[in-house]
Amino acid sequence: MKSLPSALLPVQHPSRWLALSLALVALTLPMSARAQERLLRTLTVTGQGRESIAATLADVTLGVEVRESSATAVQAEVARRMNGVVNVLRSRNVEQLQTTGISLQPNYEYHNNQQRLVGYIGTSTVSYRTPSNEAGAVIDAAIQAGATRIDGIRLTASDSAISAAQKVALQAATQDAKAQADAVLATLNLTRQEIISISINSATPPSPRPLMQRAEAMTADATPIIGGEQDVQASVTLEIRY
């Protein structure tokens, strides 16, 4: 039997291709709807976590202030006193010791609207870090060595303690978010399925707590400085399918 020329072969009708395409579209539509339903059936909750840690460190800024009739005398006395203060601080093995300020300015008196130069004021300040339970004794020693001013004390925790507390606070925030979701879904007779997304909103380290103290208030006894506690807070948001 002779084969028919290709031009004489039966051609599939275009309507068959159209029907097949429509059938494929029909099959995909229910899946798309189910996917949309899965996306719509989600619950978003935000949990909070908190962890308290001891403020075991004190960041202290102190220095000397001298008033003399001449700039040379001021600078000489400032240098003498500050050298004594620095030597004491180094002997106490303080950390992060550094100079934070040096100044020299004229000192004027005003009488009957007249300005008169009476001398100069010189200052020099340093900052350092020490354990909070030793801070009072170190400050008293610095004052005995020549310090005349305390510009500030900030109480804080160590970096390692803060990092560990942040992780604990994040865990607590995540558990809190899950517990909130379960409480809501259980009330509605629904069940938590998979977690769609996780957002860490914050894991905030505590701000150092300032403590101001005047040098004139120091006594012969060690000045008590109590570190207390600081709170590390965290926030986590979960998107949960149910």
Image (tube, helix red, strand yellow):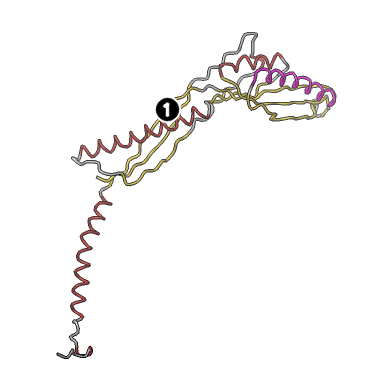
For the view shown, which residue lies furthest in the left direction? 1
Q: Is residue 74 magenta?
A: yes
Is 177 in front, or is 171?
171
Task: Please indicate whether residue 52 sits to the left or right of residue 110 in the image.
Answer: left
Q: Is residue 175 magenta?
A: no
| Dominant secondary-structure state across the stretch colored magenta | helix
**Quarter of the image holding residue 140?**
top right
For the view shown, which residue lies furthest in the top direction? 220
Q: From this view, report whether residue 228 is shown above or below residue 219.
A: below
Residue 27 position in % (x across, y down):
20, 64
**Quarter of the image holding residue 5?**
bottom left
For the view shown, which residue lies furthest in the front direction? 1
Q: From this view, report whether residue 160 is shown above or below residue 93.
A: below
Is 22 in front, or is 68?
22
Task: Please indicate whether residue 190 sits to the left or right of residue 229 in the image.
Answer: left
Magenta residues span: 70-93
Mark 1 is surrounded, within 10 Å at the Cα level, by few (under 14), some (14 to 19) or many (20 or more) other residues, namely some
Q: Quadrant of the C terminus?
A: top left
Q: Quadrant of the N terminus?
A: bottom left
Residue 81 position in % (x across, y down):
76, 19
Q: Identify the residue position indicated by label 1 in the image.
A: 51
- Residue 43 appears in view: no
- Residue 124 appears in view: yes
Q: Secondary structure at mark 1?
A: strand
Q: From this view, report whether residue 210 is shown above or below residue 14.
A: above
Kind of residue sitting beneath label 1: Glu
Is 237 in front, or is 95?
95
**Quarter of the image holding residue 31?**
bottom left
The residue that appears at 19% across and 87% down in the rendered structure is 9
Residue 97 position in % (x across, y down):
66, 26
Residue 54 position in % (x across, y down):
48, 22
Q: From this view, report whether residue 189 is shown above or below residue 134.
A: below
